[in-house]
Image (cartoon, grey):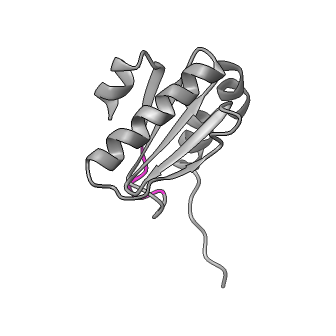
Amino acid sequence: MLQELDDDKAENVVTIDLVGKTDLADAMVVASGRSTRHVGAMADQIVSRLKAAGLANPKVEGASACDWVLIDAEDVIVHLFRPEVREFYNLERVWSEAAHIAATTDA
């Protein structure tokens, strides 16, 4: 998937290891596109490639606006952003801080 993002001219691609942080997925990929059109095109390409690789129905959110598109590829979650939206939500910081918060249990 990283090679495909590179081929699609994705910018600032970051992979975040989620093992031990959540059961949602094993990894998160965060990347930026230059515009809503670029984000939408990258999302379409990723979904097509996932289907060709055998993932019958990848879940996609945000494709109508293309400011932030989330693609759930089972073990990997892909976030595609316009740069301004990515800066605002700053998922890389959120997940890096989450790795340092100790889990607590209610007594």
Magenta stretch secondary structure, dominant: loop
> Is residue 67 among the parts visible in the rendering?
yes
Is 80 left or right of 5, judged from the image as shown? right
- Quadrant of the rendering where the N terminus is positioned: top left
* Extent of the magenta region: 16-21
Residue 86, by quadrant, is top right
Is 12 located above or below residue 102 in the figure? Answer: above
> Nearest the camera: 52 or 92?
52
Q: Position of residue 99 (x, y in %)?
A: 52, 48
Residue placed furthest toward the bottom: 107
95 part of magenta stretch: no
Is 8 left or right of 54, judged from the image as shown? right
Is 100 located above or below residue 20 in the figure? Answer: above
Q: Position of residue 18 (x, y in %)?
A: 43, 50
> Nearest the camera: 10 or 56?
56
Residue 63, by quadrant, is top right
The residue positioned 33% from the left and 19% from the top of the image is: 7
- Quadrant of the rendering where the C terminus is positioned: bottom right
Residue 103, by quadrant, is bottom right
Q: Position of residue 2 (x, y in %)?
A: 33, 30
20 part of magenta stretch: yes
The residue positioned 36% from the left and 58% from the top of the image is: 56
Is 35 located above or below residue 42 in the figure? Answer: above
The residue positioned 60% from the left and 69% from the top of the image is: 104
Q: Position of residue 88 (x, y in %)?
A: 73, 28
The residue positioned 27% from the left and 54% from the top of the image is: 54
> Is residue 30 among the parts visible in the rendering?
no
